[in-house]
Amino acid sequence: MAVALTKDNFAQSVENGVALVDFWAPWCGPCKMQLPIVEELSTELAGQAVIAKINVDEEPELASQFGVMSIPTLILFKDGQPVDKMVGVQSKDALKSKISGQM
């Protein structure tokens, strides 16, 4: 299961290693297509990468901090720093190869 991030646990969740964060909202149609892919990755990559999600309605400060204008937006972090940003629905294979490239 993807980790639900808030401003309270965000920093420690992405500070070490590779983390993929999905910025989403419950009312967003494309987000509903992206979420099962993110959940599958969290199972497949357990122990290798942090797979997380942020509800932009509940955490507007985090969305603003990373310049999220449209959702879904997925940001790949390496040791706490954003290294890649993808807007729109992404395929599982595309995400997996981007994550693998940072490991």
Image (spheres, grey):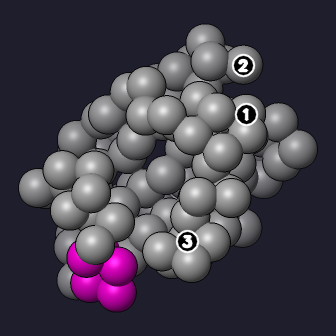
Which residue is located at x 26 percent, y 84 percent?
57
Residue 22: x and y, percent?
Answer: 43, 56
Q: Height in image: 1 above or below 20?
A: below
Residue 28: x and y, percent?
Answer: 21, 73
> Does the rendering let one see residue 40?
no
The first of marks 3 and 1 along the sequence is 3
Which residue is located at x 64 percent, y 33 percent?
79
Q: Is residue 57 left or right of residue 100?
A: left
Which residue is located at x 72 percent, y 19 percent?
103
State the residue position of label 2.
Answer: 103
Q: Is residue 68 left or right of residue 73?
A: left
Q: Quadrant of residue 18?
A: top right
Q: As shown in the figure, which amino acid type bears the numbered disc 2?
A: Met
Disc 2 is placed on an element classified as loop
Which residue is located at x 66 percent, y 45 percent?
15
Q: Quadrant of the N terminus?
A: bottom right
**Does residue 59 belong to the magenta stretch?**
yes
Distance from Cα at disc 3 to Cα at disc 2:
21 Å
Distance from Cα at disc 3 to Cα at disc 1:
16 Å
The first of marks 1 and 2 along the sequence is 1
Mainly helix, strand or loop, the magenta region?
loop
Disc 1 is placed on an element classified as loop
Q: Height in image: 2 above or below 14?
A: below
Which numbered disc covers residue 5?
3
State the residue position of label 1.
Answer: 17
